């Protein structure tokens, strides 16, 4: 019986030793860092620029916009939905001379006409116009602003950028486009979704090409 007791004790000791060894190995494995450290460049925020909306590919939406065009004005196509001449709450807007980027100093207003996907909730669309210096730097202060509230489930709208004085000063301009929920500050960097550019000159602009995306 004593031999058997010692044998049992020895077996237990061996099992405890094996378990301790396994536990030690597991502890070593769990304590190791298996993740390869990332390089510093990938963990920092890179400077970003909002996309230009001047050039668009057909059928490729930008932000919430199905299409967005700079223009000389707009027309209302009342006969788009239902019978011709019937009133509709969401008339189709057709930009006049879409894609125009050259304007004369006496232009009353520069228009940005757009279509968005049907909105679940009302949204606010806004724009700021900044002069661009000869050195290419954008001015710090906006000279023209406009905003528009678009009700839910409507798709069309426009922004009217009126001349800041009797005439537009000749030069280049940058337009910043913003989208935000109602009640929020529209002109905030986090709400900016893109930019557009135009030039004011006393040289007669060439006719803008027609655009089938607005039809």
Image (cartoon, rainbow, N blue to C red):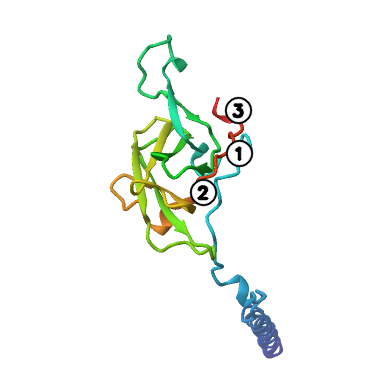
Q: From the top left corner, tell me how far across and down residue 27 is, in percent.
A: 62, 81
Mark 1 Cα shell of 10 Å, populated few (<14), some (14-19), many (≥20)? few
Task: Give residue 199's mark.
Answer: 2
- Which is nearer the N-term, disc 3 or disc 1? 1
Residue, disc 3: 212
- Which is nearer the N-term, disc 2 or disc 3? 2
Image side of residue 115 versus residue 57, left or right: left
Mark 2 Cα shell of 10 Å, populated few (<14), some (14-19), many (≥20)? many
Reply above or below: 78 against 74.
Answer: above
The quarter of the picture where residue 101 lies is top right
In front: mark 3 or mark 1? 3
Reply above or below: 30 against 134.
Answer: below
- Which is nearer the N-term, disc 1 or disc 2? 1
Q: From the top left corner, tell me how far across and down residue 136 is, in percent.
A: 54, 63
Q: Quadrant of the C terminus?
A: top right
Residue, disc 1: 60
Mark 3 Cα shell of 10 Å, populated few (<14), some (14-19), many (≥20)? few
Q: Quadrant of the N terminus?
A: bottom right
Reply above or below: 210 against 196.
Answer: above
In front: mark 1 or mark 2? 2
User: Judging from the image, what secondary structure is the residue with disc 3 in?
Assistant: helix
Residue sitting at 42 percent across and 40 percent down?
Answer: 107
How many dots with numbers? 3
């Amino acid at each position: 019986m004593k031999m058997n007791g010692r044998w049992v004790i020895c077996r237990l000791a061996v099992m405890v030793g094996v378990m301790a060894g396994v536990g030690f190995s597991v502890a070593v494995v769990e304590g190791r860092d298996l993740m390869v450290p990332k390089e510093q460049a990938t963990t920092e925020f890179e400077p970003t620029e909002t996309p230009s909306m001047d050039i668009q590919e057909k059928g490729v939406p930008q932000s919430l916009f199905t299409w967005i065009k700079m223009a000389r004005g707009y027309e209302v196509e009342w006969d788009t939905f239902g019978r011709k001449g019937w009133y509709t709450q969401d008339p189709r807007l057709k930009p006049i001379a879409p894609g125009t980027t050259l304007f004369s100093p006496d232009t009353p207003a520069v228009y940005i006409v757009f279509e968005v996907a049907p909105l679940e909730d009302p949204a606010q669309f806004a724009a700021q116009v900044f002069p661009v210096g000869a050195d290419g730097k954008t001015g710090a202060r906006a000279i023209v602003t406009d905003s528009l509230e678009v009700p839910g489930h409507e798709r069309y709208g426009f922004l009217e950028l009126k001349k800041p004085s009797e005439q537009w000063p000749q030069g280049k301009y940058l337009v910043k486009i913003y989208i935000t929920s109602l009640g929020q500050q529209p002109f905030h960097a986090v709400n900016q979704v893109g930019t557009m550019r135009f030039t004011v000159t006393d040289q007669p602009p060439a006719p803008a090409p027609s655009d089938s995306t607005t039809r």
